[in-house]
Every structure is written in structure tokens, then in C-alpha cells.
Amino acid sequence: MMNIYKWVKVGGYGLAGLLLIISIAIILTLCWDSNQTSYLRMQGGAEPYIIKNINIVPMTGDTLLNNHDILIKDGFISKIAPDIFDRNIKQIDGTGKFLAPGLADMHVHVWDDYELGLYLSKGVTTLRNMWGMPFHLRMKKRIQENTVYAPIFLTASPKLTGPMDDGIDKKQVKDAREGKYLVSKYKKQGYDFIKTYAGLPSDIFDAIKDEALQQNMSLASHPSFEVPYEYHFSKPIKTIEHTEDIVQQVLKFKDDSPMLKETIAKYAQNKIGHTPTITVFHKISEIIEKESNLLSEDKIGYINPAFLAIGSQEDYNRWTSTKVYDSLVGERIFKQHQQHLKLVKKLNDAGGLLLAGTDSGISYAVPGFGIHEELQFYTEAGLSNYEALKTATVNPSLVYPKLSLTGTVETNKLANLVMTKENPLLHIRTLENPEMVIIKGQLLYKNQLEEFSEKAYHRSNYWATIIRLAEGILFK
């Protein structure tokens, strides 16, 4: 008996020692990762300054304010005029340059702090993260406290789906009562809105919506296949994600449907935002067409290494193997991509509220780069550059009150701005390589933006990401 007790005691000490070692390893890994992104730490507040003789793209209309001055003070646009003179305030020469609102990517999956800097380097000053985990709440707190250079950051809750829709990335809700509880829980934890997913049946969905209304929480919905598509045109749903789901649920993969006109009309009537995410779907075509050549492209080095090895690789394996036994899959995927472009044009022409979103951080959609691909797809669909830019500037500010001070260059708006060499109303891709980015009034010069991009390239934070992902899966 004594021997058994002795070995149990020794085993207990051994287990405790192992847990201690694992805990120390986790802490050291996360601390090391945090130290690696110390270049993003904000250095004090911004002094007032005037940008002189700049061409302003106000986004209040399809127009340009030529050779104006703009005064930035306390993080906001204090004054815009043809000439502002104050010898006591720093002056920046903007001659020949253009100043536009910073861009919003309204459907992303953020994996680490490196991506915050990478987005800024590409002119993105607002992010809506669509798979919330505990580390996103800590990230959001740091951003709100102005301790790091980062875009404005809104984050979804964990993804809520029904009891029959399994997957480690989703929170399966067993019944209506649990649905109500989770909405209340996520509100208290600090998530900005509830993300609903593809497997929610109507009774649980109804309960989630009712509780969200009570809690003054909005919903962003990846359409559920358990309810009709038109079900999603109801409060408190503010946005419906993915044009591909219109093709699947409304069109049933056909070219047209009697329900399509009704669906587009409901988008316009209800002013519910639609986030196309054309970019991530198009990555399927790129996988099928390029195969291993895609993996050697320079941009791939900007994808989080853990997700690249797990999620992206899974997508790659799926579609390259499908191509082996289905030679027409590439043709079908490209045809559906073309359908997406047509639908974006129809939604825009009908007065629908399009929100630029890329699903960056998933598959091979690259953070920061993706928004410029997305906007290019919108212009390819037939939108003017101004109309395309509205989806990433003005329109997000109409959906979320927290973004109401963004999206245009006007007095008393937040100074989230992008300076470029060319006029984005004529050359929309100029926004991909900004001369300067201003975030909450803080100036980020080209050399800083280049550093943010370089630090994110081939970063070594595989295990830190795995730890944060494991936390998110365990503590939904």
C-alpha cells in the first residue's frame, strides 16, 4: 500500500512539474512573440500639424479638392481650407500628392500583431475581425488604449452554429436557451457583435436574435443553410457575408432565379450590408490554375506561418486533388467567380450597401494585399473607382456607429487617412503603396510602413499562434 501511495505521490509531483514546464514554455513563447512586435508600440501623442497644398479625395462625392490645406489636431481633422497659416504648427508639404480616407477591410481573420502593421502598410485603417477569440479582446484593449499602431479594430464573437454543424472553429449551440446565454456572455466579454454561422436552425437563430436585440448587439451572418436566405433580412442582422452564398442559396448555382430580383431589392430596402469576399473565392481558381507555383509567390510570405501550414494547406490539398478527378472544376469555379462580379454590379446599381471584405487570413487571401484585389474586382465588375472606394470608406461608416467618424475627409472626422502619389479616383491601385498613412492623427512615414511590411514577412511565430488558437478553441 505504501509503495502505491509513494508512486501516486511521485506521479503527482511529476505531473505538476510537467504542467509547470509547459506553462513556463507558453509564457516565454508569448512574451517572445510580443517582444518581436515591439516596433508597433506607439511613441507618445501626435502634435498638431498642417499638410499643405494637398489634393483631397473627400469621398463626400465623386470630386477632388485641389491644392488644399488640412489641419490635424488631437487625432481629428480640425480644419480644411485653401490656405491655413500658423507658424507655430508643424507643416508637411503635400504638393502633388493626394489624401484619401483610410480603407476598411470588413471581413478578415487576424492571427497576430504583425498583421496590424501589415494592414497599415497597405492603407487599411479599419478592420472587422470575423472569428473572435480571447486574444482578440486583449488586442482590442491595447488598440483602444493607444499603446500600439493599429487600425480601428472591431471583432466578432466566436462563430455560433447549430448542434449538428460540427467543427473546432465553431461554437455549437445546443438549444435556444444556450443561444441567449452566449449572446449575453459575449457582450459582457467585450465582443463588438455576434457572428452567426451556416448551421443555425430557426428556433436557436430566433433566440439569438431576440437576445441580441435586448443586449443592443448586432449580428453579422454567414448565411445559415437551415433557414431561407430571406430570413437574414431581419433585425438585428446588420451584414450578410459572401456573395457565393447568394449563388448557392438563391440561384441554386444557376444563372438566374425569380428570387434574385427580390433578394437584391430586399438588400436595398433594408439597408443591410453585404460583404462580397470575392478575393478569397478567387483563390480557389488560383490554386487550381497555378498549383505549386502559387506557393512560391512572394506574397505568400506575409501569411501567418501556422495558418499557412494548416488552413491554407488544407485548401491547397482539397482543390488540387479535386482537379485530379474532375478536370472541369476550374471552369466551374471561374464561371461562379464571374457570377459574383455580376451580382456585385447588380447589388450596387440597385442601391445595396456593399462593404469591401476579403476574408484575408483564410486560404491564400493575404492580409493588407487582399483589399486592393477586392476593389480591383469591383471595378472589373463595372463599378467606378469612386463606387468601389465607397465600399471601403463611406459604407462601413453607415453600418457601425463606432465607425461613424471615419470614411470621409471632413472637419471633425477622425484623422485616418492615406497619402498617395496618384489620384485614387483615377488609379485605384495607388492606394496599395501609400506615401504616408495617418492613424488617429499619428503620422506613419513611408520608411515606417516599409518596416511594418518587412517585419511581417516570413515571421517566426508558429507556436505563439498555435497557443492562441488553442485558447480560442478551448474557451469559446
Image: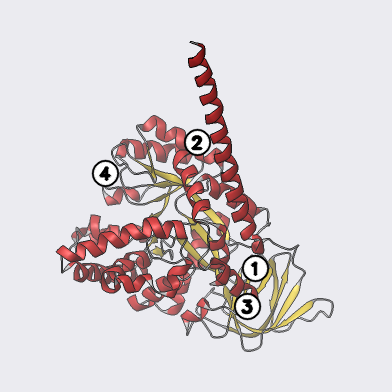
Q: Within 10 Å of the Cα at label 3, are there few (<14), some (14-19), or many (20+) other Cα atoms?
A: some
Q: Within 10 Å of the Cα at label 1, are there few (<14), some (14-19), or many (20+) other Cα atoms?
A: many
Q: Give the mark, 4 or 2, whose residue is nearer the N terminus.
A: 2
400 horizontally vs 329: left or right = right
Q: Give the mark, 3 or 1, whose residue is nearer the N terminus.
A: 1
Q: Give the mark, 3 or 2, whose residue is nearer the N terminus.
A: 2
What's the amino acid at mark 2?
Answer: Ser
Q: Please, is residue 254 above or below residue 433 in the view?
A: above
List x then y, in percent, for residue 212.
46, 40
Q: Give the mark, 3 or 4, whose residue is nearer the N terminus.
A: 4
What residue is shown with label 2? 184
370 horizontally vs 286: left or right = right
Q: Please, is residue 98 above or below residue 448 in the view?
A: below
Query: Residue at point 47% right, 85% down?
Result: 426
Residue 415 image label: 1
What's the amino acid at mark 3?
Answer: Lys
What's the amino acid at mark 4?
Answer: Glu
What residue is shown with label 4? 226
Front residue of this view, candidates 187 and 364: 364
Q: Is residue 295 visible?
A: yes
305 horizontally vs 94: left or right = left
What residue is shown with label 3? 446
Contact flag, marks 3 and 4 (Cβ < 8 Å): no
